[in-house]
Image (cartoon, rainbow, N blue to C red):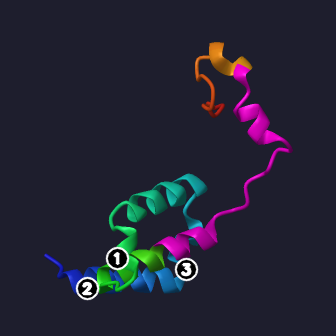
Amino acid sequence: MKSNTSNHRTRTLKSLSGEYDNDDVFTNCNRIRELAGEFDLIDIIDPTSAVCGKLMEIVARAKCLKEFELIPDGDTLFKDPSREESPEGVGQVRARS
């Protein structure tokens, strides 16, 4: 079993080497969300090496994200009350496959 130090060092090296460049947008977004949930915001004030490693991975993954296409007035479409009868409901959207 690897020690915590070697796990964090690996995470750090992966972040520095650009290893997340080839991950798709959804993988990066999901992983950023998972990592962010693993520590509290107060932990950033005096971070441990584990928190530093996670922060490095979050930033590295965020830098790899491709730009999303912004739809003019997209927030109006998203919050449109006429969506109440839609299967997703108000404030919810479904990705087309």
Q: Residue 60: which quarter of the image?
A: bottom right
Judge from the rendering whether residue 29 lies leftward or rightward of residue 7; answer left or right: right
Q: Residue 68: which quarter of the image?
A: bottom right
Q: Are marks 1 and 2 in contact (CB under 8 Å)?
A: no
Identify the amino acid type marked 2: Ser
**Residue appearing at x 83%, y 41% in the figure:** 73
**Residue appearing at x 54%, y 75% in the figure:** 59
Identify the amino acid type marked 1: Asp
The residue tagged 2 is: 6
Q: Which residues are magenta?
A: 58-81
| Of residues 86 and 1, the one drawn nearer to the viewer in this rendering | 86
Alpha carbon distance from label 2 to label 3: 18 Å
The residue tagged 1 is: 43
Give x and y (percent) for residue 44.
Answer: 40, 79
**Residue appearing at x 75%, y 40% in the figure:** 75
Give x and y (percent) for residue 81.
Answer: 71, 22
Residue 96: in magenta span:
no
**Residue appearing at x 78%, y 35% in the figure:** 76
Q: Is residue 28 visible?
A: yes
Q: Which mark is residue 18?
A: 3
SS for dot 2:
helix
SS for dot 3:
loop
Q: Residues within 10 Å of mark 1 (few under 14, many from 20)?
A: few
Q: Quadrant of the N terminus?
A: bottom left
Q: Quadrant of the C terminus?
A: top right
Give x and y (percent) for residue 21.
Answer: 59, 71
SS for dot 1:
helix
